[in-house]
Amino acid sequence: MWKWLHPYAKTERAYQLCNTLKPWFWLGALGCLSIGTVWGLLFAPADYQQGDSFRIIYIHVPAAILSMGTYVAMAVAALVGIVWQWRTAFMSMIAMAPVGALMTFIALFTGAAWGKPMWGAWWVWDARLTSELILLFLYFGVMALYAAFDDKQQAGKAAGVMALVGVVNVPIIHYSVEWWNTLHQGATISKFDNPSIAAEMLWPLLINLLGFALFIGAVTGVRLQNEIIRRERHRPWVQQLAAQNLDDKGEKHHAV
Amino acid sequence: MNPRRKSRLMVVIAVGGLIAGAMGLMLYALTDSIDLFYTPSEVIEGKAGQYPKVGQRLRIGGMVVPGTVVRDTTSLAVSFDLVDTGPKVTVNYIGILPDLFREGQGIVATGVLVDKTTINAEEVLAKHDEEYMPPELAEKMKGIKHVSPNQGATTP
């Protein structure tokens, strides 16, 4: 069933796959983000309670959802790396970590900026905010652990274990607003049958969500390629690639 | 799947299960401490047999009872009642209320319990719900007249 995946355990195939996918991801991200953001900020109606301040939702919610989504993807990569020992799995895990950390930071930052005018406080130690902050520290932990080892295969294993253990935090973040009394309100759009948001406000949000996802995919692709090149720089195919790039540059130079 | 991979997968699943179980038990044991606030009924009727003591610092969260907001005309002092499903608790507060503060709104207040049903708050935060809709729709569905948050809270 999973046979089609096997070639991508090889670094060269994974590198080529990134090359093929990257332009589509960048294009899609650019398109979705510009449509969703302009629609959300200019054309969606203002909220009945929060007025225009609610528009920060178009950044906050996609970043928050994808901070968790990226973590799950990272944990899946770690699982594949640990069980099947694919080198590319750990590479993609570490390629995703800073991107996910950035999403978490954006979610926390926009949440604070939203909380101040609406709730009256930048920060409250309620279960949702605290567990999201722990998610940021988990990302930092994975990155720091990976950086601490010189042998990158060992580093991948250690960081992978940490990424796997931390995945228990993801359901806690999601259900925190149901399990405990929190200042943060309950889920809005994950109730797919009946989201608590008017349709003309929901569409730009979903488009932006897709845009954020494609952006994360694109940046992860670039980072994965860099990681592959860095780790495989002594392999013949990388040196061939480098030589080819040098040739291209040389030709351009001559042409000028 | 070859046996080595299988055994690694089993170890990962077992360790993951243990950690999830441990976290679950920990969070279950901590439930009371993780809650951000008491509800008014918990303040008066107790929470799991525990009553908050007079003089205790606590957070309370509930809905502002319409018609109970009393503002002092010469200072920033304000008092209002909070309710969830049962009895009411009175909150006294001196200071600026958040923009979203209005009657019927969910509120979280931090303060000291001065007697069984009164709290002197030093911080009042507004809690909003997860519903977003344009003003016209809100008026149609809920009968809520739109008040711009920029004016709503400051006019008495």
Image (cartoon, rainbow, N blue to C red):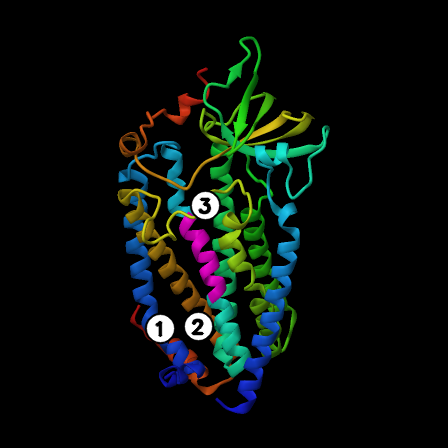
Give x and y (percent) for residue A170: 52, 59
Q: Which of marks 3 and 2 is nearer the N terminus?
A: 3
Whole-angstrom CA distance, mark 3 to mark 2, is 39 Å
For the N terminus of chain A, give its image quadrant. Answer: bottom left
Question: Which one is in front, A30 or A197?
Answer: A197
Disc 3 on helix, strand or loop? loop
Residue positioned 34% across, 56% down in the render: A211
At 53% from the left and 9% from the top, the residue drawn is B73
Q: Name the residue under label 2.
A: A225
Whether residue A250 is visible = no
Label 1: chain letter:
A
Q: Which of B150 and B13 is in front in this view?
A: B13
Q: Which label number is shown at residue A186?
A: 3
Q: What residue type is labelled 2?
A: Gln
What range of the chain is rendered magenta?
Answer: A61-72
First in residue order: circle 3 vs circle 1: 1
Q: At x 45% / y 61%, what residue is drawn? A: A69
**Residue placed furthest toward the top:** B74
In the rendered view, does A203 fall on the left or right side of A65? left
Asked which quadrant contains residue B88, the reply is top right
Tell me if mark 2 has few (under 14), some (14-19) or many (20+) residues whose alpha carbon lies within 10 angstroms of its own. many
Q: Which of B100 and B120 is in front in this view?
A: B120
Alpha carbon separation for disc pair 3 and 1: 40 Å
In this view, the mark in front (3 or 2): 3
Label 2 with label 1: CB-CB less than 8 Å? yes
Label 3–label 1 contact, CB within 8 A: no
How would you classify the magenta stretch by its main secondary structure? Answer: helix
Q: Earlier in the sequence, mark 2 or mark 1?
A: 1
The x and y percentages for residue B35 are 60, 44
- A157 left or right, relative to A51: right
